[in-house]
Image (cartoon, rainbow, N blue to C red):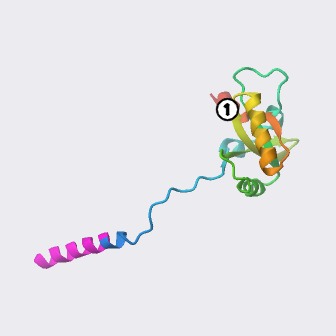
Amino acid sequence: MKTLLTVFLFIIAFGIGLTWYLPPHTELLKSPYQIDEGSLNEPLEAKDLRLKIMPSPEEAFGVQFGLFTKLVQATYMAKQYPLEQPIHIITTKESQQRWHILLLGPYSSIQEARAGQYRIKNQFNLQSKLVRWPIEQEKKKNL
């Protein structure tokens, strides 16, 4: 019995000693993009992203700065732009063609969206356009 207890304590002490050699804990890196799974399975209509002349007060806005036919292209490009907020990748369809769109947002006002558009232009020299934020609208439709 004493031998068994000695072996058990030795294994515990040895395991504790090995933990000193583990690298320090680091937080997992956040992904620079978020893929909207709902639109990936059932693409949104591209026309739903177009801005209205008179948007409603509860409407949100986004900045579109990428449009790709393949998801792998969209994710690759999303990794190229280190931004402080995550990039959203949504899937739309227009004339039976699927498009994967890079979006920043949501912004609660057009002024905030224009500021985001300005940052993209200055930081990466990218052309972009303002769009209606489609993700929240899609969730409301499903309720």
**Amino acid type indicated by mark 1:** Glu
The quarter in which the N terminus is drawn is bottom left
The quarter in which the C terminus is drawn is top right
Residue, disc 1? 136
Provide the residue span drawn in magenta.
Answer: 1-16
Q: Residue at x 72, y 41 (%)?
A: 104
Q: Residue at x 69, y 53 (%)?
A: 82
- Left or right side of 19 for 6: left
Q: Of 104 and 8, which appears nearest the observer?
A: 104
Can you tell which quarter of the image residue 23 is in? bottom left
Q: Residue at x 57, y 56 (%)?
A: 29
Residue 132 makes an appearance in the image: no
* Residue 25 location (% of width, % of height): 45, 61
Please, what is the dominant secondary structure of the magenta stretch?
A: helix
Q: Of 38 and 34, which appears nearest the observer?
A: 34
Question: Within 10 Å of the Cα at label 1, are there few (<14), some (14-19), or many (20+) other Cα atoms?
Answer: few
Q: Secondary structure at mark 1?
A: helix
Verify whether residue 13 appears in magenta: yes
